[in-house]
Amino acid sequence: MTTTATRYPQASIEADPDIPAVHIWRDFAATPEQLMRAHTDPELFRQWIGPDSIPTEIDHWDCRTLGAYRYVGKRDGEEYAFRGTFPHVGENRIVQTFCWEAMPEAIALETLTFEDLGDGRTRLHAVSLCDSFEGRDAMLSSGMDTGIHEGYANLDRLLAR
C-alpha cells in the first residue's frame, strides 16, 4: 500500500502476489496535465518511451476513448512492434490494452493514473493485468525494467524542458 508520504524518484516495479498483475509507481516533477500530454501526444511519447537502444516510430496513434495505437522499436535490423486500444482516456487516467506483436495471445489490460501530489509533483501508478501468471512473469523477465527506467529518465528530461 502506497501513500503520498512514500516517494518514488525511481520506478518501483512489483508483481502482485494475488493476481497476474504488475504495479509500477513513479513520481515526476510535473503536473498531471503534463504527464497526461506526454502519454497521449504521439510526438512526445515517441521521444521518451522504451530503452535508449531502441528508437521508436509511431505507426498509428489515436489516443482517445475507443482509439487505437501501434508503435515499432527498431534495433540492429530487428523490429519490436506493440499495439493496442484505448478503451478510456480521461482527465487523469488512461485505460489501454497492450500487446507485443510477437506474442499476440498475451494481451495486458493497463490502467495508468496520474495523482497530483502538490508542489508540481505527480505520481504515476500503472497496473498491467496480464492473461496469466506465466504471462506476467514473462513480461517481468523480458527486460521491461530497463525500458521503464531508461524511458522514465528520458521523460524526466523531456518534462524539464
Image: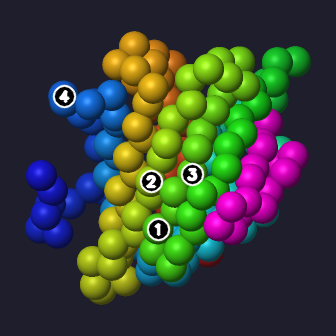
Secondary structure beneath label 2: strand
Q: Residue at x 77, y 42 (%)?
A: 71
Q: Is residue 76 above or below residue 25?
A: above
The residues bearing labels 4 and 3 have C-alpha atoms spaced at a distance of: 22 Å
Q: Residues within 10 Å of mark 4 (few under 14, many from 20)?
A: few
Q: Are marks 3 and 1 in contact (CB under 8 Å)?
A: no
Residue at the spot of label 3: 96
Q: Are marks 1 and 2 in contact (CB under 8 Å)?
A: yes
- Looking at the image, tell me whether mark 4 or mark 3 is earlier in sequence order: 4
The residues bearing labels 3 and 1 have C-alpha atoms spaced at a distance of: 10 Å
Q: Residue at x 33, y 72 (%)?
A: 115
Of 36 and 49, the residue lying toward us:
36
User: Which residues, given as a range, are shown in magenta?
Assistant: 58-72
Number of numbered callouts drawn: 4
- Looking at the image, tell me whether mark 1 or mark 2 is earlier in sequence order: 1
Residue at the spot of label 1: 93
Secondary structure beneath label 3: strand
Residue type at mark 2: give it: Thr
Q: Residues within 10 Å of mark 1 (few under 14, many from 20)?
A: some
- Looking at the image, tell me whether mark 4 or mark 1 is earlier in sequence order: 4
Secondary structure beneath label 1: strand
> Which quarter shows the C terminus?
bottom right
The residues bearing labels 2 and 3 have C-alpha atoms spaced at a distance of: 6 Å
Residue 105 within the segment the image draws in magenta: no
Predominant secondary structure, magenta span: strand
Residue at the spot of label 4: 17
Name the side, left or right, on which 110 lies relative to 98: left
Residue 62 within the segment the image draws in magenta: yes
